[in-house]
Amino acid sequence: MNILDRYKKPTPKFFKILRNVGIALGASGAAILTAPITLPATLISIASYLTVAGTVVTAVSQAVVSDGEELKNKENNN
């Protein structure tokens, strides 16, 4: 399975939540980095780590696909 096929398949619920957390981390880190005021170096360093971590979590979470067992279980329960 190539990467394009993986991104087209459904993502499990837990990883959707994790993806949204990653997006929030990345966005908050980017907002701090682009602030128009002078900030301490420590805060800039933490914001850059948040941005990188959020980006990685989002990319990995989006690439996780359901193996079909979850869909079969839902169909059997209905």
Image (cartoon, rainbow, N blue to C red):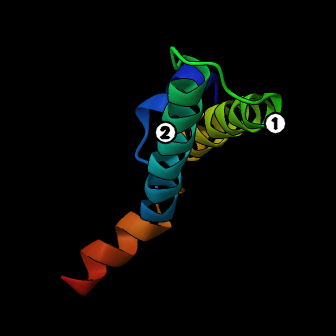
Kind of residue at badge 1: Thr
Density class for disc 2 (Cα within 10 Å; few <14, some 14-19, many ≥20) is many
Kind of residue at badge 2: Ile
Q: Nearer the viewer, residue 20 or 67?
A: 20
Q: Which residue is mark 2?
A: 23
Above or below: residue 62 compared with residue 11: above
Q: Nearer the viewer, residue 8 or 52?
A: 52
**Residue 21 x/y as whole percent:** 50, 51
Q: Nearer the viewer, residue 44 or 11?
A: 44
Image point (75%, 30%), residue name: 40
**Residue 38 x/y as whole percent:** 64, 19
Whether residues under marks 2 and 1 lie with C-beta atoms below 8 angstroms apart, the answer is: no
Total number of numbered labels? Answer: 2
Res 1 → quadrant: top right
**Residue 41 x/y as whole percent:** 81, 28
Res 6 → quadrant: top right
For label 1, the SS is helix
Q: Which residue is mark 1?
A: 42
For label 2, the SS is helix
- Figure quadrant of the C terminus: bottom left
Image point (26%, 85%), residue name: 77
Image point (51%, 14%), residue name: 36
Task: Left or right? Give the position of 60 relative to 6.
Answer: right
Q: Which mark is residue 13?
A: none
Task: Left or right? Give the position of 28 relative to 76.
Answer: right
Above or below: residue 26 compared with residue 21: above
**Residue located farthest toward the left when viewing the structure as drawn:** 78
| Front position among marks 2 and 1 | 1
Task: Left or right? Give the position of 73 relative to 75.
Answer: right
**Residue 76 x/y as whole percent:** 29, 81
